[in-house]
Image (cartoon, rainbow, N blue to C red):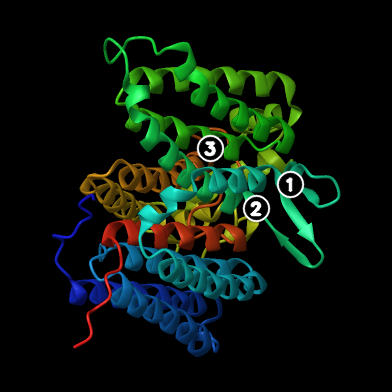
Amino acid sequence: MSRVTAERPIRTSSGFSLLVLALVAGVGAYALVGLGKRGQVPPSIGLYGTVITLGFIGAWLVVRRVARRADPLLLPAAALLSSLGFAVIWRLQPDLAVEQVTWLGVGLVAFVATLMLVRDDRLLDAYTYTIGLVGLVLLLLPIVPGIGRVINGARLWVAIGPLSFQPSEFGKVLVVVFLASYLADKREMLAAGSGRFALPRAKDLGPLLIAWATSLAVLFLEKDLGASLLYFAVFVVMLWLASGRPLYLLMGVVLFVAGAVAGYLILTHVQLRVDYWLHALDPTKVYQLGYGQLAQGQFALASGGMVGTGLGQGSPTLIPYAATDFIFAAIGEELGLLGTAALLLVYLSLIGRSLRVGIERTDAFGTLLATGLTTILAVQTFVIVGGVTRLIPLTGITLPFVSYGGSSLVANFVILALLIRVSAGPWARRAKA
């Protein structure tokens, strides 16, 4: 039996204080948006503020009940990010904000359900291949004729009747659970060799090649560079951690570069993404949609300067798809460099504390599960922020907890619940007197 953070003290007051502070900041941002945009506090602040506040306090009470030793920072960080995201989405497109707060409620229900159902994260280790199969089916479900939908050049959506969602958002969570279980079981085999930089045996390369092939399938069949990068990066990081051999990391980088070059040479969609990235400020192209989106994002960040124009005072609505791909640019325009730096510090805190959860576990499954889930959040944040700032070509990945999107928001709350479960350890019921 492994030790699972049993020594961590129960820090109820600090967790609740952080949650209250996060909710005050998030709901306060909503009020400031109304003041800046229309000169008055939004009339709906009572409704939305109550829904968000009660939702997160209810989630905290569940954590207090079934995960008493969980890290106290994780839920407040998510509350701050999602409430701030709601405020910015309402500033950009009020109709989308109504949907976002609805999905936020669904996400919190999924968060509670995950904590209640997964009483001990190690129980997931018993369903390795079932979870892996379901995860793979969800990843590739959009390519099924009749239900798959192409939006903005990527085939990521599934439509079944009136219901439309991205199954890959949930598939990636299941794939991480599968990889944590599989790699924990095979870690000794993967680590075998004469040295840290010795070439692995041919049969040990199978998992790496399978992951590479899966990521290429996502790239070529679904035409989504961002999702392909995410899946492969998560696998390589988890494989490196399980084996302790840097050579796997190096080989992963080589395979990724090879796949990216092949995708660029074959797929027009990828070529356009790279062209947008390289020539976003070309005067002859800047008014075209793809180039204009990146250009308007750059203009917005430049307009924000150090302290921003103020919530509700800028012009972020000029950015195409500002509520999804470019919400970071919208925040940068109205909160400036200081605001975006503060936002990134919240992500850094969330990611850092989540990695600490993995470090505190002494069993391989718990360590790999926490690290894999954290890598999802870290890679998504890096890819979208890097794309908006033109550090890398833009992809369709959303900014965790902040961007508009029901599937991604719900999936992120499931990830958060699993991290809290790993952090707290198994739920031990109180003995009756």
Instruction: Look at label 1 and name its amino acid.
Output: Pro
Locate residue 398 relative to residue 342 in the image: left or right.
Answer: right
| Vertical side of 249 occupied by 46: above or below | below
Instruction: Look at label 2 and name its amino acid.
Output: Pro
Answer whether residue 152 is visible to the viewer in this image.
no
Spatial separation of the CA atoms under disc 3 and disc 2 = 14 Å
Residue at horizontal 27 percent and vertical 51 percent from the top: 357
| Vertical side of 258 occupied by 350: above or below | below
Q: Report the residue marked by disc 2.
A: 167
Residue at horizontal 58 percent and vertical 61 percent from the top: 404
Tell me, for residue 49, which label it has, or none.
none
Q: Report the residue marked by disc 1.
A: 142
Locate residue 82 relative to residue 157 in the image: left or right.
Answer: left
Decide which of 411, 428 is in the foreground and name it.
428
Q: Residues within 10 Å of mark 3 (few under 14, many from 20)?
A: many
Q: Report the residue marked by disc 3.
A: 231
Residue at horizontal 46 percent and vertical 87 percent from the top: 50
| Vertical side of 48 occupied by 361: above or below | above
Residue 391, image x, y percentages: 48, 33
| Vertical side of 105 occupied by 327: above or below | above
Spatial separation of the CA atoms under disc 1 and disc 2 = 8 Å
For the residues labelled 3 and 1, say whether their Cβ atoms are less than 8 Å apart: no
User: For residue 217, which quarter of the picture?
Assistant: top right
For the residues labelled 1 and 2, say whether their Cβ atoms are less than 8 Å apart: yes
Instruction: Look at label 3 and name its amino acid.
Output: Tyr
Answer whether residue 370 is visible to the viewer in this image.
yes
Q: Residues within 10 Å of mark 2 (few under 14, many from 20)?
A: many
Decide which of 40, 236 is in the foreground and name it.
236
Mark 1: secondary structure: helix
